[in-house]
Image (cartoon, rainbow, N blue to C red):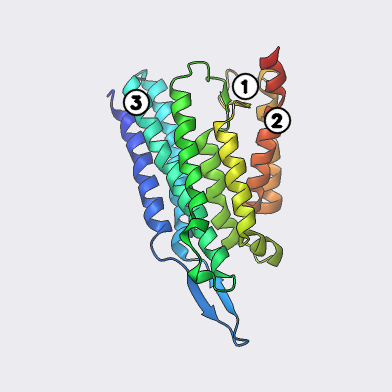
Amino acid sequence: MKHIPNLFTLLNLAFGCMAIIAVLQTGVVLLNTEEGSQMLSMPEQIFMASLFIALAGVVDFLDGFVARLLKVTSEMGKQLDSLSDVVSFGVAPGMIIYQFLRLSIAREEDGLNASVVWLLPALLIPVAAAWRLAKFNIDETQTYHFRGVPTPAVGLLIASFPLIFWHNSTDTVINLLLNKWLWYAVIILLSYLMVSNIPIMSLKFKDYSFKNNGSKWILLAIAAVLTILFKWLAVPFIFIAYILLSLPLKNKTAS
């Protein structure tokens, strides 16, 4: 009975490994058009990686829920959870960015011969995720708010980008997601947010009153509206709303 939550945690890890396999399965596909220019088509396996990371997010929620339900929380479970999260929400999303960088650089003149050095910044995501989770494990105060953006939130944000690319026909969005400078900015920003001490609200509810959970209910409402309007493209905007709604916590913790 006590190891049931750990089975969910290990399933989280398995989904993370499956996401990595999906990301690295094929690589860049080059298509020649009638005009002689090259178009880049994202392999379907990257699309599947988003699904596996989303499934990892579901079981990551369930392991904590089941542990509290069965009252079998343990230090081992806490460590297993962090180790699994590094893979599912750190390494796998880092590999998604790695492939996007490959696609972006391959579009450039002589891009297929570019140095791997241009791709290595993607590794900052798993590195920052590992730092963030280690810090979380030794900080007992992070219950109803976090210090730095939680790793699963970053992982799920990155997992949305292949879905946005795959389901979007807008040239502006597609070209933006095939711009290496955008990805370098995303890497720096998300890595900073994970390792920072910025207070970020937890989505755990003490109760369901608006008085005690106003920001959370507002975030859920924003998420619902944006999803209806923009579908997968809503995810980055929901993430930004999450950060902005957490900013009042900075004043509370300071006081």
Does 234 appear above or below 22?
above
Of the image marks 2 and 1, the number of the one nearer the N terminus: 1
Q: Quadrant of residue 60?
A: top left
Asked if labels 3 and 1 touch by Cβ distance under 8 angstroms, the answer is no
Q: Nearer the viewer, mark 1 or mark 3?
A: 3
Q: Amino acid at mark 1?
A: Tyr
C-alpha distance separating marks 2 and 1:
18 Å
Which mark, residue 245?
A: 2
Residue sitting at 47 percent across and 66 percent down? Answer: 43
Q: Amino acid at mark 3?
A: Gly
Which mark, residue 208?
A: 1
Q: Secondary structure at mark 1?
A: loop
Q: Secondary structure at mark 2?
A: helix
Residue sitting at 63 percent across and 86 percent down? Answer: 35
Q: Amino acid at mark 2?
A: Leu
Does 169 appear above or below 16?
below
Residue 177 position within the rendered picture, expressed as x and y whole percent measured from the top left = 62, 59
Of the image marks 1 and 3, the number of the one nearer the N terminus: 3
Does 216 appear above or below 184?
above
Left or right, 185 with respect to 151, comes to right
Q: Which residue is mark 3?
A: 77
C-alpha distance separating marks 1 and 3:
27 Å
Work out which quarter of the rendered image holds the C terminus and state it. Answer: top right
Of the image marks 3 and 2, the number of the one nearer the N terminus: 3
Residue sitting at 66 percent across and 22 percent down? Answer: 213
Q: Nearer the viewer, mark 2 or mark 1?
A: 2
Residue 3 position within the rendered picture, expressed as x and y whole percent measured from the top left = 28, 27
Binning the other alpha carbons within 10 Å of mark 2 as few (below 14), some (14 to 19) or many (20 upward) gives some
Report whether residue 60 is seen: yes
